């Protein structure tokens, strides 16, 4: 507890983690009133309505896909992966920032995370849910996807454990399960607060059931803290492993442009890069619309901007090494991959990638920009585009021209590809709209521990 | 007078500091069966009521070990014993490719054990509990701090315990019907 108050004292020089003048009561009221008493605004209904309609478009695109098969997409040989895998990697990468904020920053005692971890974890869950759709439907026969799990069956076979695609099944499903548990366990004490403060009988019953009868006993808190820390300790290597395993999907293959050892660290850094961009794109409008500038302060925006700057450079280093190895390896296929990126038919996207992921984010060195919400919002959207392009470059540009010129081809996404991709963005936003309306989007009990009065003074 | 069974005597405090101090005094006065309630985790509080260690870490370790072992053995048995396939002349027991899933299952079982172990040790979910009968206890999830002495404590007697709690200068005292 001592470090927390120290940090708030230091806050006079930097922007504070939480504006001064709050008490346990006012923090509780401010966050819980958004869910319990504040009337639902027209803006919420419009926003949710639009996101919901886009979700319906997703269901339509998927329904048509189930009727017709993956032939409605632009995929073909040689580019068999196309949008499905681009979007899968993009979404799962976005999820990584949530776990980084909730687990890694917890272990590093970065208490500023306390006001953004809840909705960042929600973002993780929804992003992983969106990501999961793609490989599932990309299998072509999603109703048989359970064949990927090892279960005793009449066909008398077992899955192939030497395949990275199977590793992915385990990594992503573990990631979703652990993220869900972490998020729910973090919610339990706050659900108890909502149960105790709600005026409506039904809300009391529903929040009460979800709160599991939490009463804040010292014994419970003691075990709770142990479990929470252990879960953070387990989630930390997990989050690093998930994108590592995703990168194995590529790196284990021999396709030029994929078969490289830089992939795991560079994928993880890229994941956190895009994840923080998404955190900012959500945090900036949310704190404005719900008046939460006192809790999500300029300090949070600045720290996120610095994380993006750092991970952005790791990503830039990855691109550099890829290009360097294309030349240094002396392998003519690797060299051609580099040439093809610079001069091939998709060269425009490679240069856009360099612009979005390396050039434009350098503006974050400017302090005034790091404290400007609008500037950060725009840069974050550029980074998200850039990270999407990165996956497009990796998936499509490597596959479309590999070893044999006779089997080269081009890949063009169809309207169904675009509808599915846009549809998952709608689903993600619809889930976020519901989340901020029915659950506390900032962890109330962890915010209380940030207040000076939370410190137990020695006798 | 009609007697309802009494669960304990509860005192309400304004701050974490006051609660920790009161819990310490109560524990030192020889009360064994006590508990304290706070709206956020207070590190010193568990110690003050005489609760030192918990078994969550052990349960997590056991769960993680079971997950890792069963993950590896499952892959070994399926790939080398039950359904061996020759992939490019690699050995059936190609352990490096089993590491990823072993690792993932270690984390999965460890995490599930941590969460459900903690809930089980805490006796949750438990929708009804006698402390909820005290009307002021709704504040325990907001900004008030409570101390309870259970009626099962050998030193508990209704008037003596109330006098003792009065000495700790709480904001209010309530008898908790069970």
Image (cartoon, coloured by chain):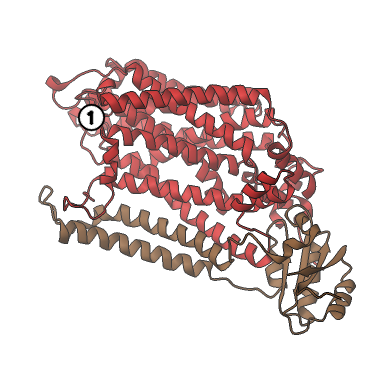
Chain colours: A red, B brown
User: Residue A421 at what x, y percent from top left?
Assistant: 40, 25
- The residue sitting at 28% across, 60% down in the picture is B72
In front here: A9 or A136?
A136
Q: Tell which subunit mark 1 falls on.
A: A
Up the image or down, A134 lies above or below A154; here it is: above
- The residue sitting at 35% across, 16% down in the picture is A415
In front here: A369 or A413?
A413
Q: Is residue A270 visible?
A: no
- The residue sitting at 41% across, 63% down in the picture is B64
> Image check: A18 left or right of B56?
right
> Image check: A95 left or right of A334?
right
> Image check: A237 left or right of A439?
left
* Label 1 Cα neighbours within 10 Å, binned few <14 / some 14-19 / many ≥20: many
Q: Residue lying farthest front? A: B2
> Split into 4 quadrants, where in the image is the C terminus of chain A?
bottom right
In front here: B91 or A430?
A430
- The residue sitting at 61% across, 26% down in the picture is A366
Q: Which residue is disc 1 drawn over? A: A334
Using the rendered view, name the quadrant where residue A315 is placed.
Answer: top left
User: Residue A87 at what x, y percent from top left?
Assistant: 38, 29
Please, what secondary structure does the residue beneath circle 1 have? helix
> Image check: A120 left or right of A325?
right
In front here: A421 or A199?
A199
User: Residue A137 at what x, y percent from top left?
Assistant: 32, 33
Up the image or down, A301 lies above or below B65; here it is: above
Up the image or down, A207 lies above or below B48; here it is: above
User: Residue B175 at what x, y percent from top left?
Assistant: 82, 69
> Split into 4 quadrants, where in the image is the N terminus of chain A?
bottom right
């Amino acid at each position: 507890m001592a470090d927390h108050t120290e940090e708030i004292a230091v806050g006079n020089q930097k922007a504070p983690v939480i504006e001064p003048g709050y008490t346990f009561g006012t923090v509780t009221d401010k966050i819980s009133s958004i869910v319990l008493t504040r009337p639902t605004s027209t803006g919420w209904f419009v926003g949710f309505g639009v996101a919901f309609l886009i979700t319906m478009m997703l269901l339509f695109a998927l329904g048509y896909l189930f009727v017709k098969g993956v032939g409605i997409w632009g995929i073909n040989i040689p580019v068999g992966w196309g949008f499905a895998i681009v979007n899968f990697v993009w979404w799962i990468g976005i999820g990584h920032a949530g776990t980084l904020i909730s687990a890694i920053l917890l272990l590093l005692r970065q208490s500023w995370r306390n006001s953004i971890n809840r909705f960042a974890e929600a973002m993780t869950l929804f992003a992983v849910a969106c990501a999961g759709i793609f490989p599932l439907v990309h299998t072509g026969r999603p109703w048989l996807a359970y064949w990927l799990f090892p279960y005793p069956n009449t066909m008398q076979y077992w899955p192939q454990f030497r395949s990275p695609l199977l590793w992915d099944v385990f990594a992503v499903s573990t990631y979703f399960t652990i993220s869900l548990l972490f998020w729910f366990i973090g919610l339990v004490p706050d659900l108890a607060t909502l149960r105790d403060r709600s005026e409506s009988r039904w809300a009391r019953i529903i929040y009460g059931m979800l709160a599991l009868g939490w009463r804040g006993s010292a014994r419970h808190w003691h075990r709770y803290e142990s479990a929470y820390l252990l879960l953070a300790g387990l989630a930390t290597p997990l989050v690093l492993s998930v994108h590592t395993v995703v990168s194995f999907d590529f790196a284990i293959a021999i396709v030029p442009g994929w078969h490289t050892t830089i992939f795991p660290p560079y994928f993880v850094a890229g994941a956190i890069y895009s994840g923080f961009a998404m955190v900012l794109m959500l945090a900036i409008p949310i704190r404005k619309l719900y008046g939460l500038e006192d809790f999500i302060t300029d300090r949070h925006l600045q720290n996120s901007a610095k994380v993006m700057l750092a991970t952005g450079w790791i990503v830039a280093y990855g691109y550099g090494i890829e290009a360097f190895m294309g030349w240094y390896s002396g392998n003519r296929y690797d060299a051609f991959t580099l040439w093809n990126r610079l001069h091939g038919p998709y060269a425009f996207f490679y240069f856009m990638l360099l612009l979005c992921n390396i050039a434009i984010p350098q503006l974050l060195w400017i302090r005034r920009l790091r404290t400007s919400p609008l500037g950060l919002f725009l840069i974050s959207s550029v980074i998200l585009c850039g990270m999407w392009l990165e996956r497009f470059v990796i998936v499509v540009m490597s596959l479309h021209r590999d070893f044999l010129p006779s089997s080269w081809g081009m890949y063009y996404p169809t309207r169904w590809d675009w509808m599915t991709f846009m549809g998952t963005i709608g689903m993600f936003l619809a889930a976020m709209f519901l989340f901020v309306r029915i659950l506390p989007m900032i962890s109330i009990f962890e915010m209380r521990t940030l207040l000076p009065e939370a410190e137990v003074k020695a006798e | 007078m009609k007697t309802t069974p009494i669960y304990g005597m509860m005192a309400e405090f304004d701050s974490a500091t006051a609660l920790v101090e009161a819990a310490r005094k109560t524990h030192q006065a020889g009360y064994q069966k006590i508990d304290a309630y706070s709206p956020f985790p207070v590190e010193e509080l568990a110690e003050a009521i005489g609760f030192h260690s918990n078994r969550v870490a052990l349960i997590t370790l056991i769960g993680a070990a079971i997950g890792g072992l069963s993950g590896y053995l499952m892959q070994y048995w399926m790939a080398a014993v039950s359904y061996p396939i020759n992939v490019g002349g690699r050995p059936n027991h190609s352990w490096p490719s089993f590491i990823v899933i072993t690792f993932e299952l270690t984390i999965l079982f460890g995490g599930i054990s941590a969460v459900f172990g903690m809930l089980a040790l805490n006796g949750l979910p438990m929708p009804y509990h006698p402390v909820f009968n005290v009307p002021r206890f709704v504040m325990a999830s907001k900004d008030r701090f409570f101390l309870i002495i259970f009626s099962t404590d050998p030193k508990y007697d209704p008037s003596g315990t109330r006098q003792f709690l009065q000495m700790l200068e709480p904001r209010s005292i309530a008898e908790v019907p069970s």
